[in-house]
Amino acid sequence: MRMLKATAVALLLQTALMGTVYAQALNGNPMSDVRVRQAIAYAIDKDTIIATVLGGYAVRADGLLPNGPFKSPNLDPYPFNPDKARELLKQAGWDSSRTLEMVFYYDDQVTANLMTVLQAELADVGITMNYHLLVGDVAKTLNSIPDDPKGKSVVTWDLGYGARAAIAMQEYFNDYATGKASADGFPGSPELDGLIADSNSSTDPEVTKKALMSIDEYINKNALTIPLYYQQLYAVESNRLNRNGEPHGNDQFNYDWNIQNWTVEPDADGKKVMYTNAAPVDYFEEPWVNLGLWAGNKMIWAHMLSAKPFMDGVAEGDLADTYKVSDDGKTVTFTMRDGTTWQDGEPITTDDVVWSLETALKVPTLHGVLANTFNSIEGAADFVAGTAPHISGISVDGKTITIKFAKVDPNVLLSFTQWGPLPKKYFEGVDPTLLQQAPFWQKPVGSGPFMVEEAKFGDFTSFVPFDGYWKGKAKIDQIIAWASGDGDANMVKNAAAHRIDFAITKAVNDLETLKTLDFMKLTPLDIPYTRMIWINQYDK
Amino acid sequence: MLTYIIRRILIIVPMAVAVSFLIYLGLDLTPGDAVSHMLDPTRTVDPEKLAELRHALGLDSPLIVRYWIWLTGVLQGHFGYTLTGGVPISSLLVDRLPATLELSGTALILSTILGSILGTISALRRGSATDNVLTVVGMIGVSIPEFFFGLVAIVVFALNLNWLPVGGRLLPSYDSYWDHIPNLIMPALVLSIMMTAGVMRYARSSMLDALSREFIKTARSKGLPEWRVNLLHGFRVALTPVIVLVGFRLPILIGGSVIVEQVFQWPGLGNLFVSAVRNKDLPVVMTIALLSVVLVLTVSLIIDVLTAVIDPRVRLGA
């Protein structure tokens, strides 16, 4: 009897230790069996992939959250172990005649090489995998889920390779909530839903951090998603450029980079001209979509607040001189700075800010973090639905704007470091749905340290200092930005011809070449950018 | 001939409409639309807002309605706006067409003149060292892709010798048209190399063919000087296939050379066309495609007329 009890207790303990790891398929899809997912994790040799395919320009990822303060010490690294992978597959009764379908949306050679390696590594443990590049409506193909979480999958893919570049750590996990359309392929669980709710409901950073770590551990233990590596961003700078002590940061977003203090060596005429890339090809993108991605937008626009370089808090006020968050985190008060003007000389008013907030809520492509914050404002839902003429939670008293939130948003200040108002007067009669299609974006009038002097779309854009910038006139006389998309194919060539003083890149092949230019300096920037494999666990 | 020309012009209109509809249909059948290309694939956006955007852009209307709106707009001289940025397409054309005409036009003129001369020399000196060298050079020109020539030219002339700019067309410091001629030299020469090689091969074989004809022997037997036989009798006939070849290259004046424009960051219509196809920006794609279609049809007519003028044996409308 004692033996029986001991066995029962041991079994119970083992079950408890396993947490929510169920060692069986939960539906007709074998990917719902944790052993299969773990086998895939063990089958992938991340270190070799990083050293070879990625040329060493990446960092191994064991969790989705980046290394640093949010990194949990309790993550299983799933070290490369093909034998263990085979054993797990055997336990799971893996049908080796089954072929998994991997999809991805990067059309570069590095990704193609990575797919070849992954295919070979999975084949080595007995998993056949085909892969193909997604084209067309990629978001729909990746993110579609059945109405009923227990329903049949509405997409055909089994594995998806992609990335998450997060500004707020919650961005890594909010999509894992039950019923949330996303690429993670996880139907959801009450336990994870609870943790996700915890990570979004407090303004206490420690509470949020604990919840975020727990989520990462949950995903890791259950191998819901397989993180592969952290992509490093590189600042590419010439020896003509001097940042004068101003910090590097996460250049995918807006931070307090103080470009007005940068200098470059003068040319033969004594003019200080800085060359960069990422100027618009046809029009300037409105700044609420890809926060800070385009260098041009960072030069043109000021924000309500300034973020610290790696988004770990507010550095100082920007257009708002001061800000205050109430103890319950549900009221934020901004006092606008005196004397700030648009680049046409007109004052920046509270009316511009309120109009911009209301307009942003109706812009279809508003960034997700901003959308979360602005939709949390009291009365936002009524305003969006058209049942209220304005957002009731926003009030203005002189230079002070008070915003009341219906629920706590832990990223409220972060959002306002990335968001700034637009000049209302230029958008009279413009439908917010078609904000991006307004003529304003041919030559925007901004609020930041540089203004557009001339835009030759497809060729270059010339920026000159804005005399009225509240932090002072920039020391560089002119910035010439070559037109290019994200991942500029001509950046290396321009750098070699001394036509780049500042750029950012993640392209492995570019980095290899740039390293050979002794007048260019590469600075690696650890940013929250995780490449991963999503696993579709919905029933099939 | 006049009746023939009028009849051909009248045929151009329905043909252009039919071809443009087929292009529209083909693009519409490819997956996704302009809105799906505006989004980061990893971010989920409120489907209702996306539906509003599609509605505002007119993307939720049936294919035939969208095509009709576009077509009637074009017939009234209104090319519409880009879907992604709301930019008037007419202003895009005004910005980009001069760049493309400048690059492609220069390359076309250079290659036609050089190719015809070198091809004729090669034919007249058939079997000589000159002919062999030109044949090899021609084969190299035809075989090596433009991007390779472009990259080699950039490495040699821009990066090593520092003679020419690495790319681009304009700079704020340029005061006059002549300032940007250095920017034009390299892309125009690279583009013309391949085109020259093609014209040269055509001109050579065409000239050889002409020189073997009976009328050449007759001309010689009449005691005409050799240069006169070759140039006035032989070259004139040999020009016909060359004109056809050059004529059918004219559409690049509109479409541009995508590869050369990309290698040299040349802001022409070729680059614009590629990005519009990627973004499924149908009004832009359709406008450039329609211009190309009209140009091809017009050129085809001009070639027929020119062929008849040059070669008296050809009778139009027969």
Image (cartoon, coloured by chain):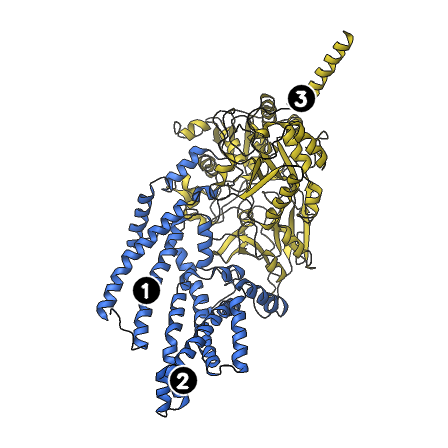
Q: Colour of chain A?
A: yellow
Chain containing mark 3:
A
Q: Relative to A429, is A413 on the left or the right? A: right
> Disc 3 to disc 2, how far (Cα)?
92 Å
Q: Is residue B184 above or below residue A328?
A: below
Residue A496, how many percent across, how many down?
A: 63, 61
Per the image, the residue denoted by label 3 is: A19
Considering the numbered disc 3 on the image, is that residue within a helix, a strand or a loop?
A: loop
Within 10 Å of disc 1 (Cα), the crowding (few <14, some 14-19, many 20+) is some
Considering the numbered disc 2 on the image, is that residue within a helix, a strand or a loop?
A: helix
Per the image, the residue denoted by label 1 is: B298
Can residue B185 be seen here? Answer: no
> Disc 1 to disc 2, how far (Cα)?
31 Å
User: What number is the disc on residue B230?
Assistant: 2
The amino acid sitting under disc 1 is Thr
In the image, A441 versus A495, the foreground residue is A495
Q: Is residue A132 above or below residue A401?
A: below
Residue B223, how many percent across, how many down?
A: 37, 93
Within 10 Å of disc 2 (Cα), the crowding (few <14, some 14-19, many 20+) is many
